[in-house]
Image (cartoon, rainbow, N blue to C red):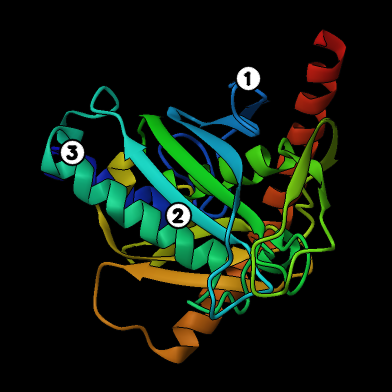
């Protein structure tokens, strides 16, 4: 918890009211983004994102698996977030466990759609190796909060998108002789790989309400003054892939539409910045290798 004096609270809210936050940003402006990819050699893909003093890492592990019988033409994705106790004293014990569960669930709602995967930002059907065969790719996505100064969900979403862009999936040869009711033999290549397609993977934009206004990329101090927050995941085509809310009472439909409109506007700038940073990080990785 952030302990702020009454004067500090008034200063934060007054600045937001005048569209001039304590660090000089406007209400709908993100902090500078720093990004690295390929930081965990053992992973299929990985990335680190720093958003101001918020520092997070995401890694992706790709393994062969069996599809859910209810969705035989789709692969599976699981997301788990760990909040390091060194990032924040409140992350010690149950505080960190509860936040880890909350962030993991929010990321699944924003990136994976409903239980059927409808509207998912990560295309689960692309993880199916051969339709009708009992084999698919399983993606295990792990997030780690190294340092926290607010807006962890957006930072983790950006790190996952960057890690997926860094992810390579081995080419496979599937035996055509296996009966349809049996798992076929699969030959996984050690030399040929395919780049994971991230064209549909969204960014997450969280709009935090402080006083009478919504702001993006709230710091910990600003979050301590919030009444509610709405997180919207939006892809390159402007499609809404997921939405989640925390704090406060229910929202009127017009308010939801207004927040989505603002999130769409902000997401274009965030997406362009993130794509630019990912391209620069990948180019740096290629030069080093």
Q: Secondary structure at mark 2?
A: loop
Is the residue 176 above or below the residue 36 in the image?
Answer: below
Residue 183: % across, % down: 65, 62
Please state if 96 lies on the left or on the right of 208 as rendered. Answer: left
Q: Secondary structure at mark 1?
A: loop
The C terminus lies in quadrant: top right
Closer to the camera: disc 3 or disc 1? Answer: 1
Q: Residue at x 30, y 26 (%)?
A: 87
Residue 2 marker: 3
- The residue labelled by disc 2 is 18
Q: Nearer the viewer, residue 30 or 103?
A: 103
**Callout 1 crowding tier (Cα within 10 Å): few <14, some 14–19, many ≥20:** few
- The residue labelled by disc 1 is 41
Instruction: Mark 2 or mark 3: name the one nearer the start of the chain.
Output: 3
Q: Nearer the viewer, residue 42 or 131?
A: 131
Please state if 172 lies on the left or on the right of 231 as rendered. Answer: right
Q: Residue at x 24, y 79 (%)?
A: 249
Instruction: Mark 1 or mark 2: name the one nearer the start of the chain.
Output: 2
């Amino acid at each position: 918890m952030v302990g702020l004096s009454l004067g500090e609270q008034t200063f934060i809210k007054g600045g937001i009211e005048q569209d001039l936050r304590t660090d000089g940003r406007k209400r709908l402006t993100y902090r500078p983004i720093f990004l690295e990819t390929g930081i965990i050699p053992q992973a299929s893909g990985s990335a680190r994102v720093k958003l101001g003093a918020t520092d997070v890492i995401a890694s992706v592990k790709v393994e062969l698996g069996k599809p859910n019988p209810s969705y035989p033409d789709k692969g599976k994705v699981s997301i788990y977030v760990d909040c390091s106790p060194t990032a924040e004293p409140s992350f010690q014990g149950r505080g960190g466990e509860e936040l880890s569960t909350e962030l993991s669930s929010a990321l699944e709602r924003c990136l994976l759609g409903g239980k059927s995967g409808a509207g998912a930002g990560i295309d689960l059907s692309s993880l199916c190796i051969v339709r009708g065969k009992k084999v698919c790719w399983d993606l295990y996505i792990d997030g780690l909060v190294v340092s926290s100064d607010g807006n962890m969900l957006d930072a983790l979403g950006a790190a996952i998108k960057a890690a997926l862009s860094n992810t390579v999936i081995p080419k496979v040869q599937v035996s055509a002789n296996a009966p349809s009711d049996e798992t076929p033999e699969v030959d996984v290549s050690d030399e040929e790989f395919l780049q994971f397609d991230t064209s549909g993977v969204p960014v997450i934009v969280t709009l935090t309400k402080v006083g009478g206004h919504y702001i993006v990329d709230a710091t910990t101090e600003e979050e301590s003054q919030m009444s509610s927050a709405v997180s919207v995941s939006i892809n390159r085509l402007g499609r809404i892939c997921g939405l989640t809310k925390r704090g406060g009472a229910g929202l009127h439909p017009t308010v939801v539409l207004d927040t989505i409109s603002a999130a769409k506007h902000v997401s274009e700038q965030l997406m362009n910045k993130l794509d630019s940073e990912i391209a620069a990080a990948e180019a740096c990785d290629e030069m080093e290798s």
